[in-house]
Image (cartoon, grey):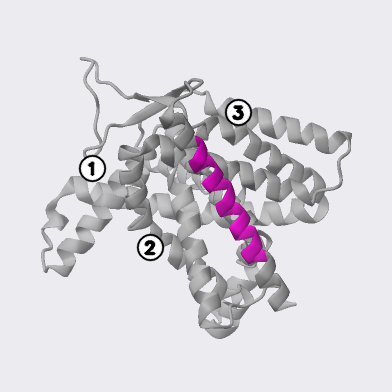
Amino acid sequence: MPQQPRTLSDKFFLVLKGLGMGAANKVPGVSGGVVAFVAGFYEEFIFSLQRINGKAFKLLINGRFRSFYRYINGRFLFLLLFGMVVSYFSVSKLLDYLIVHYELYVWSVFFGMIIGSIYYISKDFKDWRYHTYLSLAIGALIGLGISFLDPAKQNDNLIFVFFCGIISVSGMTLPGFSGSFILILLGNYVLLLVDSVNALYDTIHEILGGDFDFINNPERIHMLKVLAVFTLGSLVGLVTFSHILNYILKHYKSITISSIIGFIVGSLGVVWPWKETKYKLSESGDFLYDSSGLKIVENYRRYLPDLNQETFIAIAFIIVGILIVLALEWYGQKTRKEDA
């Protein structure tokens, strides 16, 4: 049964967890589900999402709003999702800046966090048999294989955008499966996580300033439609995946967890710190830029580093990433003991 956040401290840390999930979902190769798993609220997150079902809608239609709110574990979901939304307009912007100016060190921290996550998830897993080893290997191969695929071209067709929303949200429900990197492969990362979000930000800023000229801007209206359809697809994907995962966690928990460990191991190929970024080029060979003025990433070429000062600093940041996960684990254990 889920534990409702009781104190102000509980609520604050839940919002912080939402910030962490939102930031992780924005970075290609990093999964918000890993944050949920390591911070100790993954199963409650899945449980709460799968309560959004026929009974919940019946309560809502009958006007029993308080019962609906309690049934879906509303306080938990609201605080978590609030943190994610805030993250897209704050923490993710900071991450964009850090990746541009300190790319190696940012990827090093994430690489360390993934290593720490593998340790955290696998240390208590004891059911190692041939089928769990097999699911581990399959998960790792899929995760690694995805990291070397070439991306498709951008597509703003609303049906495809809805599909992108369903797929991209997998990173929140399936640890190790990076939804943002999947969007790169589908060709719509910039469209859906940069341009459309910036369009919403600009629109809100103009409305607060009393400027409604955006209504006559067909490009802006189209981008807002794209964001709305993407958001709807994401919500459908969240609820759908949560029901599927809740079922398989109940009936095939060992295989599911070993597959998740495999996905996370495979994702190390995406977040490998030492890589050369391949940017999209126009037909004339010039760099293509998004609406924020940043070069559009196409994929990465990975390499082994030379042993120099920069490499040793990067290794230090990998250790920092591992320590962050261990600190989250310690906090999660402390919280669970207090709740017991």
The one nearer the camera, 254 or 318, is 318
* 58 versus 221 height, above or below: below
Q: Which residue is at a point 48% across and 38% down the rendered structure image?
A: 108
Residue picked out by circle 3: 144
Whether residue 285 is visible to the viewer of this picture, yes or no, is yes
Main secondary structure of the magenta stretch: helix
Q: Which residue is at a point 52% across and 31% down the rendered structure image?
A: 272
The one nearer the camera, 327 or 229, is 327
* 134 versus 56 height, above or below: above
Residue picked out by circle 1: 292
Separation (CA) of disc 1 from disc 3: 30 Å
Residue picked out by circle 2: 86
Disc 3 packing (10 Å; few <14; some 14–19; many ≥20): many
Separation (CA) of disc 1 from disc 2: 19 Å
Disc nearer the start of the sequence (3/2): 2
Residue 318: where, in percent of width, then height? 53, 41
What amino acid does circle 1 point to? Ser
Q: Quadrant of the C terminus?
A: bottom right
What amino acid does circle 3 point to? Leu
Residue 329: where, in percent of width, then height? 65, 59
Separation (CA) of disc 3 from disc 2: 31 Å
* 227 versus 301 height, above or below: below
Q: Secondary structure at mark 1?
A: loop
- The residue segment tinted magenta is 315-332
What amino acid does circle 2 point to? Val
Disc 2 packing (10 Å; few <14; some 14–19; many ≥20): some
Q: Quadrant of residue 261?
A: top right
